[in-house]
């Protein structure tokens, strides 16, 4: 028996309720968070979203190769980024109008690139030009200064860091643009799965810094896109 039910604002699938107007209402598509869902559920949700929004970019975050193997059979145009762990259906390079500038995604270390790539790929799916600047942490701060002109050219800056997460404060003290700080869980024992980085970023003495949750590259990209579009 088909469990789908159409409502003016959403569609019921039995195991999920799909928002019909989220892209128009919020400026971002409904993203499928994969952990906790079966590959078949992810595939059926993306297939239904594809039908509902035939001209929109679609995305599923924190996806595995096993998830994609099932999704690709239901949504043939889907592609998978194994570093960002994002399944995407790309239909438009500028889905939400004109952006004012570039989003710079700055990573303190190579170990944080998966979180940085989640932010970068989501920002691109939302139509933003993205400049990736990786492995410029404070342990070799000359590397940051070498890229400072590029960072200052961006309209919004996402800084991804773990350990003591000092890079967000340093960047915040060197730029006139908004900085979105993303703490990561990566670090030695006293990093407490990212809590140390989170608290360090929240306690930054540099102004103009906002902080999202641990490893939340997706949330940082959505916020950066809204700032870039304002």
Image (spheres, helix red, strand yellow):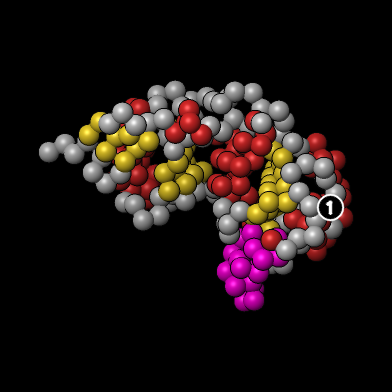
Residue 86 at what x, y percent from top left? 49, 44
Packing grade of label 1 (10 A; few <14, some 14-19, many >=20) is some
Which element is circle 1 on?
loop
The N terminus - image quarter:
top left
In the image, what residue occupies the spot 71% across and 28% down? 100
In the image, what residue occupies the spot 80% across and 60% down? 205
In the drawing, does residue 181 fall left or right of residue 170? left
- Extreme-left residue of the structure: 1
Residue under label 1: 173
Question: How many labels were placed on the picture?
Answer: 1
In the image, what residue occupies the spot 33% across and 48% down? 39
Picture layout, residue 63 above or below residue 121: below
In the drawing, does residue 195 fall left or right of residue 31? right
In the image, what residue occupies the spot 70% across and 60% down? 201
Task: Find the magenta span and give its range.
Answer: 183-201
Q: Is residue 13 visible?
A: yes
Q: Is residue 197 visible?
A: no
Q: Is residue 107 magenta?
A: no
Picture layout, residue 70 above or below residue 129: below
Query: Magenta: predominant secondary structure element?
Result: helix
- Extreme-front residue of the structure: 8
Image quadrant where residue 109 sits? bottom right
Image quadrant where residue 170 sits? bottom right
Residue 93 at what x, y percent from top left? 57, 25
Residue 169 at what x, y percent from top left? 78, 57
Residue 133 at what x, y percent from top left? 73, 46
The C terminus - image quarter:
top right
Image quadrant where residue 203 sits? bottom right
Q: Is residue 185 magenta?
A: yes
Nearer to the camera, 223 or 162: 223
Nearer to the camera, 69 or 142: 142
């Amino acid at each position: 028996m088909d469990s789908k039910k159409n409502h003016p604002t959403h569609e019921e699938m039995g195991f999920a309720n799909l928002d019909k107007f989220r892209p128009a209402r919020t400026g971002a598509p409904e993203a499928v968070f994969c952990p906790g869902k079966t590959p078949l559920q992810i595939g059926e949700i993306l297939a239904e979203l594809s039908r509902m929004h035939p001209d929109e970019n679609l995305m599923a975050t924190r996806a595995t190769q096993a998830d994609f193997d099932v999704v690709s059979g239901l949504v043939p145009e889907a592609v998978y980024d194994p570093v960002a762990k994002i399944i995407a259906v790309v239909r438009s390079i500028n889905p939400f109008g004109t952006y004012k500038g570039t989003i710079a995604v700055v990573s303190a270390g190579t170990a944080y690139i998966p979180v940085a790539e989640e932010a970068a790929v989501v920002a691109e799916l939302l139509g933003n030009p993205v400049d990736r600047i990786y492995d410029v942490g404070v342990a070799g701060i000359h590397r940051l200064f070498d890229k400072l002109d590029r960072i200052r050219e961006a309209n919004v800056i996402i800084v991804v860091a773990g350990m003591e997460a000092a890079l967000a404060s340093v960047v915040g003290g060197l730029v006139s643009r908004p900085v979105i700080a993303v703490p990561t869980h990566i670090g030695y024992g006293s990093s407490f799965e990212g809590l140390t980085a989170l608290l360090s970023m929240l306690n930054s003495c540099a102004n103009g810094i906002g902080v999202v949750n641990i490893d939340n590259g997706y949330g940082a990209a959505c916020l950066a896109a809204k700032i870039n579009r304002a």
